[in-house]
Amino acid sequence: MNKESSNILVSEPDKSAASRKEDHIDLAFKSATQCSEKDNRFYYEPIHSGHLNKNLDLKSTIANKTLNYPIWVSSMTGGTEKAALINTNLAKVCGLYGLGMGLGSCRQLLYENKRIHEFDMRPLMPHAPFFINLGIAQVEQLILKNELAKITDLINSLSADGLIVHINPLQEFLQPEGDIIEFAPIDTIITLLDKLTCPIMVKEVGQGFGPKSLNSLLELPLEAIELAGYGGTNFSKLELLRSEPIKMAAFEKVLAQGHSCTEMLTWINDFYDTEPELIKCKKIIFSGGIKDFLDGYYFTKKSKLPSIYAQASGLLKYALDFESLCKYVELQIEGLTMAH
């Protein structure tokens, strides 16, 4: 070997080359893809950038508090020992990675506080956005009874940043123990905004919002609208599954009503294009059918309004084991960075 050719030798041998090549041979057939599997939402352009710095700034804000990543832990559960463990692990993850979180329904805390420890997550996430959650039926009743101060007291007792109101008329109708909603939820939300000074979000519970509902909400000074679109966890279906088979058979077709995040994204962007001056809502939270970081990346990039995305079932799958939950969140963050 001459002197010139010796200069091209690498300083360290590739010690993993042999095993890597063996893997390539063994997995070649298994790694074949089908065109039907292709994700048509993106163009894959491999020549125009290198790998971005993993310290890419993906920060966002909710209620004037910083999210390190545009990921929200969507409201799930509360009021049982198992739910307490789930919420504890989720809150610890939010504190560790700088994510935001909404509690499951806090309804029972309006009337007694013996289980308040199962909702008191602020010590685990002292700097992250943290919201309590009540149903529109409960808010309606508090307004009628002139007891809205109970909401403020609950927010203060949990050191929360604000209130999420879940809009769930179909769920309440199908729930065996469901409440009657007497007034149009939009009127209740307007009254709530007039009476309370805390940040307020509005969310659906699996059916999403039609265009008229979305436009009306966008015109209000809400901290955020969480879409909870069709295609994810559906609480109306959950209630039917709790019912007797004859009721499930009678009402099953009703569950097909709703709107996906893709539909709602189109309506939100159309409203922004035509009447941007009417929009007062600060942020959109894409949830419902958001399975992973690619879904989240897609919707937040396509949205013309400031947005983040939420997950529920994906996190719930690992929420009973903190180590697994951390690993899942780390991979979602890594994937989101890769997507950018």
Image (tube, grey):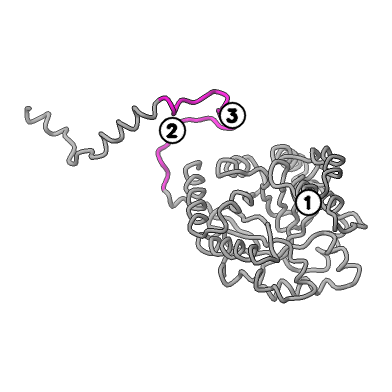
Task: Say which residue label 2 marks.
Answer: 48
Judge the density around disc 1: few (<14), some (14-19), many (≥20) Cα neighbours within 10 Å.
few
- The reply to whether the magenta stretch includes residue 260 is no
Residue plotted at (56% across, 59% down): 320
Check if mark 1's residue and mark 3's residue have beta carbons within 8 Å.
no
- The reply to whether the magenta stretch includes residue 32 is yes
Judge the density around disc 2: few (<14), some (14-19), many (≥20) Cα neighbours within 10 Å.
few
**Type of residue at label 2?**
His
**Type of residue at label 1?**
Arg
State the SS at label 1.
loop
Mark 1 or 2, nearer chain start: 2
Task: Say which residue label 3 marks.
Answer: 40
Residue plotted at (51% across, 46% down): 336
Task: Say which residue label 1 marks.
Answer: 242
Mark 1 or 3, nearer chain start: 3
Magenta stretch, main secondary structure, is: loop
Instruction: Tell me where the magenta segment starts and ends, as one range.
Output: 29-53
Task: Tell me the tag on residue 137.
Answer: none
Residue plotted at (73% across, 54% down): 281
State the SS at label 3.
loop
Residue plotted at (6% across, 27% down): 2
